[in-house]
Image (cartoon, rainbow, N blue to C red):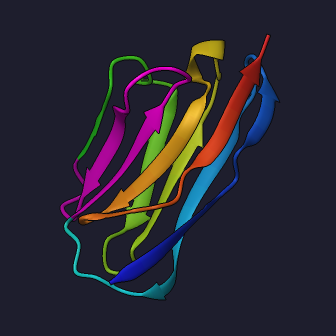
Amino acid sequence: QVQLVESGGGLVQVGGSLRLSCEPSSGRVSATTLGWFRQPPGQEQEFVARLNNYGDTNYSESVKGRFIISGDTAKNTVYLQMDDLKPEDTAVYFCHVGSFWGQGIQVTVSS
């Protein structure tokens, strides 16, 4: 098993940037995919971005061109560079490594 810890969230103004990090505090797992999901207030969890061990990425349409996912499957680390943030990006963000989830971190974009 692996315990994942997220950091880098917080409050930012519209148009600003944040970089989310997700790193293991203990353990390691064999993972072929790394991902980020988010849950906006009062809504269901939704997909944000994914990276596989071949380096292939895919993004939700709502973040494409603004967010970049990076990471290392062997190290179980995953990052999300978020630029040109919008109020609709406000959510709790969760990293996903293999079949394991981080605890979630709040991102709030104020207008």
Q: Which residues are magenta?
A: 33-56
In the figure, 21 relative to 31: above or below?
above
- Residue at 80% over, 34% down: 11
Question: How many numbered badges does the structure rendering display?
Answer: 0
Q: Nearer the viewer, residue 42 or 106?
A: 42
Q: Quadrant of residue 85?
A: top right
Vertical order, 1 against 81 (above or below): below
* Quarter of the C terminus within the rendering: top right
> Within the magenta stretch, is there residue 12?
no
**Left/right of residue 60 with respect to residue 15 in the rendered view:** left
- Pinpoint residue 88: horizontal percent, then vertical percent: 57, 15
Does residue 9 appear left or right of residue 51 in this picture? right
Q: Quadrant of the N terminus?
A: bottom left
Q: Residue at x 50, y 34 (%)?
A: 67
Q: Nearer the viewer, residue 56 or 42?
A: 42
In the image, residue 30 lies at what x, y percent?
Answer: 22, 80
Q: Position of residue 58 (x, y in %)?
A: 26, 37
| Residue reaching furthest to the top | 111
For the question of whether residue 14 can be seen, the reply is: yes
**Residue 39 appears left or right of 92:** left
In depth, the one of 92 and 51 nearer the eye is 92
The reply to whether the magenta stretch includes residue 48 is yes
Q: Is residue 105 left or right of residue 26?
A: right
